[in-house]
Image (cartoon, rainbow, N blue to C red):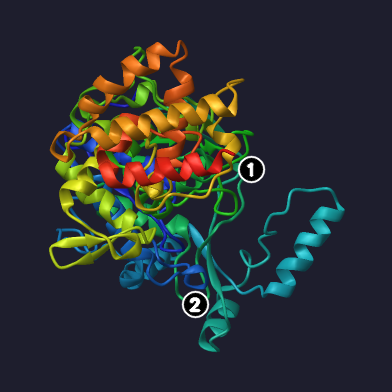
Amino acid sequence: MEKQPPVVRTRFAPSPTGFLHIGSLRTALYSWLLARQHGGQFILRLEDTDLKRYVPGAASAIYNGLKWAGLNYDEGPDIEGPYGPYVQSQRLEIYKKHAHELVEKGLAYYCFCDEATLEKIRQEQIAAKKAPKYDRRCLNLKKTDVEKKLKENTPHVIRMKIPENRKIEFYDLVRGKMSYNSGEIDDQILLKSDGYPTYHLAVVVDDHLMNISHVTRTEEWLPSTPKHILLYEFFGWEAPQWAHLPLLLNADKTKMSKRKGDVTLENYIKKGYLPEAMINFLAFLGWNPGTEKEIYSIDELIKDFSLNKVHKAGAVFNAEKLNWLNSYYIKQIEPDKLTEICIPYLEEADLIKKNGSEWEIADGIKKDLKWIKKIAALEKDRLEFLAQIGENAKFFFKLPAYEKELLIWKETPAEKIKESLEKVKTIISEINEKDFSKEKIQEIIMPEAEKIGNRGAMLWPLRVALSGQKNSPGPFEIAEILGKDESKKRIEKAIEKIV
């Protein structure tokens, strides 16, 4: 294994070609953990040289996503540092300088082939059952011909000159010893005809000039690593340590792509996933501490994380596990904070509307914050993500329509169900308003339910009458939140349904 450098500097270098991919956040997390674990620096750099795929607003989404997740960076486009600028489109002269330096050294060359020529070469190679590669026809151009074409502003690119029959070996912190043959590598374009660099040139130049010690990225970039190692060699620079992470996979083992399912962090933020849950979940997508422990704080992750325990195989994105973790973290939120973060989702569901110091619900009825707090506290255990509260709790605001069959408990005759509801209605009517609590309601109703020998025949229809749903919290908790008058009104409607 290569020796550990004295200063650990990692980077996250996304392209603003779309909103932050959940897999990209996992890569950022591993880079961040590595830096924090060694007291180093974590840098954000935007690789925005792909002008055709640039998406307005994507850069802001990257900044906001990292800040939401708590992955604070030490240097970046919006944080001044000693190695800026941290946006590639602002570094074009740097790349041009280095590309021409390689040409002068004889390690790169001008290529004047147009698209039609390149396509013809490609088709001929395919027909000959050869792997498509540039045939180097411009490598042997006379110096005078090159100078003439440059003087005439003939469109051109700069390609790196790959050495022949070289074994390129490197050690990967995740995958161990890796080996490639240079004969399998194409003469990579370094500088495009528009003056913009390709990823390969820019990433090597930037990582060197920004003193990056560890490059963490997904396994898709493994085939590019030999090219990058050669570029470090061409420039006479020391290469960083490499760590190629496993891909994130869908449940069917296909790669998680932007065209399939929820893959952007923004979607999860909108649904009400918590950063603590997301970070805990992503940490385990490829890494395993080797223990049974599943709940990790960020400080514990910093302490225990190790690239040596990152798997080589792809990591399946288990949405059920994410929901389980998120529900766990929701349960830890104290009531006032839970109410505060649930309110936007209740507003979005058109269940509440701010009206002065109160909240207006269905039919113009006004409620205070304490009432909403009770709903949030009761629904907390049923939430996998915060946006669910709109659907789960809407019966508190307006009784949904339901069929009378839902009131029937198993094989209990309808007449018995009606009698139970009549009894409950009487009990509720006789409880004083000031004593109308879940404890008091339960204290009186439970003995009556026991008397009929089948508690479900009283408690089931009561819960359905109050919620209009098959699945809901307990009837006593619902009744307390609804209040005496609304509870009585809903029970009367249920009785009317049973003929």
Residue density around tag 2, few if under 14, some if 14–19, many if 20 or more, within 10 Å:
few
As helix, strand or loop, the secondary structure at mark 2 comes to: loop
136 horizontally vs 231: left or right: right
Residue density around tag 1, few if under 14, some if 14–19, many if 20 or more, within 10 Å:
few
Which residue is located at x 64 percent, y 43 percent?
184
* Residue 157 position within the rendered picture, expressed as x and y whole percent measured from the top left: 54, 71
Classify the position of the N terminus by image quarter: top left
Which label was assigned to residue 257?
none
Which residue is located at x 49 percent, y 21 percent?
457
- Circle 1 sits on which residue? 183
Q: Quadrant of residue 475?
A: top left
Kind of residue at disc 1: Gly
* First along the sequence among labels 1 and 2: 1
Which residue is located at x 23 percent, y 48 percent?
372
Q: Quadrant of residue 38?
A: top left
Depth check: 364 or 412 in front?
Answer: 412
Depth check: 12 or 418 in front?
Answer: 418
Which residue is located at x 60 percent, y 24 percent?
413
* Residue 331 position within the rendered picture, expressed as x and y whole percent measured from the top left: 27, 31
Q: CA distance from mark 1 to mark 2?
A: 28 Å
Comparing labels 1 and 2, the label whose residue is closer to the camera: 2
Q: Furthest-bottom residue in view?
A: 152
- Circle 2 sits on which residue? 194
As helix, strand or loop, the secondary structure at mark 1 comes to: helix
Q: Quadrant of residue 374?
A: top left
From this viewpoint, is residue 488 visible?
Answer: yes
Q: Count the labels in the image.
A: 2
**Does 412 appear above or below 349?**
above
Kind of residue at disc 2: Asp
Depth check: 337 or 376 in front?
Answer: 376
Classify the position of the C terminus by image quarter: top right
* Residue 480 position within the rendered picture, expressed as x and y whole percent measured from the top left: 25, 37
